[in-house]
Amino acid sequence: MSKTYVLDANAVLDFVEDAAGAERVEQLLRDARRGTPLLMSTLNWGEVFYHSWQQRGEESARRTVSDLSRLPIELIPVDLPQVLKAGEFKVVHKIPYVDCVAAALAELRQATLVTSDRDFEKLGRHFPILWIARS
């Protein structure tokens, strides 16, 4: 069985903005085309949308998510086990709730979280993390 990856919003934003982690995300997308599961929570997808809107305006944000929707990223609806695990992470580790949602998906799917967000360092070793860029 192939490894499963969960994208945090900042990994996708790195890809969109051609930032430091973009090349690693591109490799994961190539792997996903060959069958490696690449997941993202719909809540984190929304985070990409609102961040894009804030940075470049509504039209650009809508175009960005439209373009992203053609990529081999499986969007996972947020369900009760995920929100409860996210709530647990929020209480115990004090990181932003939307980050907790990505972390919860990674833990529940026994996946590797893909991120460059240092907030995830507070989680310890709940699941593997692929750091795509570190400053």
Image: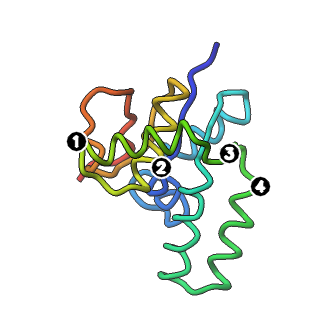
Disc 1 is placed on an element classified as helix
Q: Against 98, is 65 above or below? A: below
At mark 3, the secondary structure is loop
Q: Which mark is residue 122?
A: 1
Q: Quadrant of residue 109?
A: top right
Numbered disc 4: secondary structure: loop
Which of the two labelled residues, at mark 4 and mark 1, occupies the earlier sequence position? 4
In terms of sequence position, does the residue under pointer 2 or pointer 1 come before the other?
Answer: 2
- The tag earlier along the polypeptide, 4 or 2, is 2
Say left or right for 51 vs 69.
left
Say which of 116 and 102 sits in front.
Answer: 102
In front: mark 1 or mark 3? Answer: 1
Position of residue 61 in the picture relative to residue 123 (left or right): right
User: Around disc 4, counting alpha carbons within 10 Å, would you say few (fewer than 14), some (14 to 19), or many (20 or more)?
Assistant: few
Circle number at residue 70: 4
Residue holding disc 3 = 73
Q: Horizontal and vertical percent for residue 26?
A: 57, 46
Q: Residue at x 52, y 64 (%)?
A: 47
Q: Residues within 10 Å of mark 3 (few under 14, many from 20)?
A: many
For the point 61% across and 43% down, the residue is: 79
